């Protein structure tokens, strides 16, 4: 049975706004969040012939990153941060104590990382197929209800991206994962790492253990609602217990795995009621199904919570709680191991980038991403301009 992932420190109100869906998809698809800034480019492949005079921004070993790639990256960065006019662009850079040259360097670093990922994926033979890339995109569209063309195209236009941009980034995402699976060993967290994970993600949260009955098909909703009403009556009459629910899961579920294990749904954070034992039928918009385990095909389920565990709000936790249920500890350890693996995978990519021979060429005089930093002073709410003159000088000098 596929386990539901733990939703650590991630409260949910059942439904997401369309804006939240956009933001979540874009964070997944092309990392346009300013802090990570993983916007794609179309850098030239390995072994290409070029030099600074032919419009190149940088050389990465024997591959090149064009100025057009850098300009596109910065353009998408600006759109993702709503910096569509020169004044807001200058004010943003000033507020971040960042020059145009520094932003260009960030773009080159990301594009260089993309090139290195592509090269390593080719070396390992783990380049994803077009079908695999499309499957990832389709899954994201379904998860965030962006499966109609008009909504999808509107979202792409909002971020200044094309279908090709999205496909390239998804391909890189898959390559990064495949490289990590080949080159970065997964390991169990130490007790100290497990404690740190709890301190970071779980303080003040309530984790719940649930069982489920799964309904599929055209009549899934009506069958779920009918049984749910019956179970509520049995619960009120005191004739419903966990053993009875397990039997109902075996006899009513349309999922073979659920039938076999009596509907155990392991531990997960959720938006269930605070009651220790609770029942409800749920659609794809709320509760456990929000993580995408069920609901994408109209699946309905009834959940029965038998155990809860609440982590205190105290931030002074110095050891793993002794009363932590073993099943919950296993789930936390699994999530912590995944987080460690992802972190170590990023460090591995950073090391590959550090080992690469990178030559950065000067900023062209006509670069479209240059801006007059004196525009930042046009708003009284902008930050102090103490570093603005140096930013302008750096941006216009073309220095490295």
Image (cartoon, helix red, strand yellow):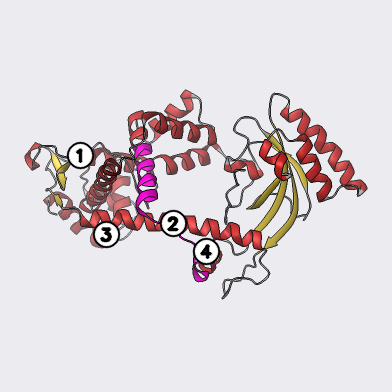
Q: Earlier in the sequence, mark 2 or mark 1?
A: 2
Going 41% across and 32% down the picture, which residue do you hit?
Answer: 132
**Cα separation between marks 3 and 1:** 23 Å
Distance from Cα at disc 1 to Cα at disc 4: 44 Å
| Dot label at residue 368 | 1
Residue to which mark 2 is pinned: 186
**Bounds of the magenta segment:** 169-194
Tell me the number on the disc at residue 197: 4
- Looking at the rendered image, the disc whose residue lies closer to the viewer, 1 or 4, is 4
Labels 3 & 2 near each other (Cβ < 8 A) = no
The residues tagged by marks 2 and 1 sit, at their Cα atoms, a distance apart of 44 Å
Q: Position of residue 312 (x, y in %)?
A: 65, 68
State yes or no: discs 4 and 2 in contact (Cβ < 8 Å).
Answer: no
What is the number of the mark on residue 92? none
Q: Earlier in the sequence, mark 3 or mark 1?
A: 1
Would you place residue 254 above or below residue 112 in this image?
A: above
- Measured along the vertical axis of the image, is residue 184 above or below residue 286? below
Residue with the mark numbered 3: 385
Q: Is there a contact, CB below 8 Å, between mark 2 and mark 1?
A: no
Question: Alpha carbon of mark 3 to alpha carbon of mark 4: how far?
Answer: 40 Å
Give the SS element for disc 3: helix
Q: Position of residue 321 (x, y in %)?
A: 63, 71
Residue 187 point in image, percent of width and height? 46, 60
- Residue at 16%, 48% (x, y): give it: 61
């Amino acid at each position: 049975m596929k386990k539901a992932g733990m939703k650590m420190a991630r409260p949910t109100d059942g439904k997401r706004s369309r804006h939240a869906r956009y933001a979540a998809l874009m964070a997944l698809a092309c990392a346009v969040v300013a802090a990570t800034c993983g916007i794609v480019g179309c850098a030239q492949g390995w072994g290409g012939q070029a030099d600074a005079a032919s419009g190149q921004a940088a050389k990465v070993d024997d591959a090149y990153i064009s100025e057009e790639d850098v300009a596109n990256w910065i353009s998408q960065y600006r759109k993702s941060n709503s910096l569509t006019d020169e004044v807001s662009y200058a004010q943003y850079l000033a507020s971040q104590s960042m020059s145009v040259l520094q932003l260009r360097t960030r773009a080159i670093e990301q594009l260089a990382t993309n090139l290195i990922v592509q090269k390593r994926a080719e070396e390992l033979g783990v380049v994803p197929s077009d079908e695999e890339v499309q499957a990832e995109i389709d899954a994201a569209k379904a998860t965030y209800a962006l499966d109609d063309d008009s909504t999808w195209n509107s979202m792409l236009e909002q971020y200044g991206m094309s279908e090709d941009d999205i496909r390239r980034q998804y391909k890189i995402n898959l390559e990064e994962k495949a490289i990590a699976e080949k080159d970065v060993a997964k390991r169990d967290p130490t007790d100290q790492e497990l404690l740190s994970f709890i301190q970071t993600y779980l303080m003040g949260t309530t984790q719940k253990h649930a069982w489920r009955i799964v309904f599929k098909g055209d009549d899934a909703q009506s069958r779920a609602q009918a049984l749910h009403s019956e179970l509520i009556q049995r619960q009120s009459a005191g004739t419903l217990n966990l053993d009875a629910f397990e039997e109902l899961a075996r006899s009513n579920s349309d999922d073979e795995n659920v039938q076999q294990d009596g509907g155990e749904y392991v531990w997960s954070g959720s938006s269930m009621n605070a009651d220790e034992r609770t029942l409800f039928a749920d659609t794809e918009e709320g509760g456990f199904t929000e993580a995408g385990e069920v609901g994408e095909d109209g699946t309905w389920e009834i959940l029965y919570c038998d155990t809860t565990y609440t982590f205190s709000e105290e931030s002074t936790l110095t050891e793993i709680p002794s009363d932590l249920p073993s099943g919950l500890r296993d789930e936390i350890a699994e999530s912590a191991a995944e987080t460690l693996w992802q972190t170590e995978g990023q460090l591995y990519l950073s090391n590959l980038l550090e080992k690469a021979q990178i030559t950065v060429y000067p900023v062209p005089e006509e670069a479209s991403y240059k801006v007059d930093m004196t525009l930042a002073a046009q708003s009284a709410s902008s930050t102090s301009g103490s570093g603005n003159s140096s930013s302008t000088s750096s941006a216009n000098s073309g220095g490295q």
